[in-house]
Image (spheres, helix red, strand yellow):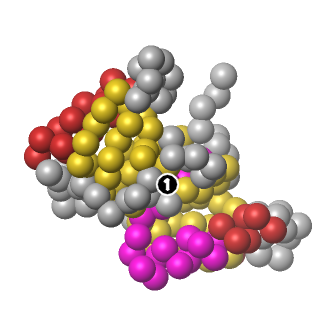
Amino acid sequence: MRRDTVLVDVVRSVAPDRKRAKSAKAQISIQFAGGAVGRLNPADPRERVWAEVLASLRESRQPAYVELNASNRITSLLLPRAHRVLAIRGADRDGDLAVELHHSQAVHYLRRRHPRFDELHDLLAEALRSQKSLLVTDALDSSAIVDLRPAEGET
């Protein structure tokens, strides 16, 4: 099964793809600070909204969490936020972890079934110990943690 490529980065630019601007395959090109390029279809209403969100993130210099398929099409967009970890507790018998974050009233969950559970648990434990912030990306429809990264300047 093919997995999308995950990217957490700041948006450098949002622009029509000049090579395809007049064709039926017109696309919006999203350039990220690290050099990656993602593409959106302006004919798709959801992807037009994503282009607006990404432009807003560029203006505020906030990172985006995106998943890119093999043709660099953006298939998912989420908004990571920087938080300090306040507590990590076992949430249930499935081995899920409940995570309390500074400036968040929700309880966030690292699900045991997450494919990077051990790696993300280690990041949480180190962030709790060091009091350094993490970029936390939650699922759109729940408080399940999708991704964790050291916050910029705190590697």
Residue at left 76%, top 64%? 46
Check the image and report above or below for 60 versus 135: below
Region rendered in magenta: 51-68
Q: Residue furthest right?
A: 24
Q: Quadrant of residue 43?
A: bottom right
Check the image and report above or below for 30 versus 36: below
Q: Secondary structure at mark 1?
A: strand
Q: Is residue 62 magenta?
A: yes
- Res. 67 in view: no
| Residue 57, position as x, y percentages in the image | 49, 74
Pointer 1: residues within 10 angstroms few (<14), some, or many (20+)?
Answer: many
114 and 60: which one is in front?
Answer: 114
Q: Amino acid type of disc 1?
A: Tyr
124 and 42: which one is in front?
Answer: 124
Check the image and report above or below for 127 versus 133: above
Left or right: 46, with 63 as reference point: right
| Residue 60, position as x, y percentages in the image | 42, 80
Residue at left 60%, top 32%? 3
Q: Quadrant of residue 112?
A: top left
| Residue 9, position as x, y percentages in the image | 41, 59
Residue at left 55%, top 77%? 55
Q: Is residue 121 magenta?
A: no
Residue at left 50%, top 22%? 113
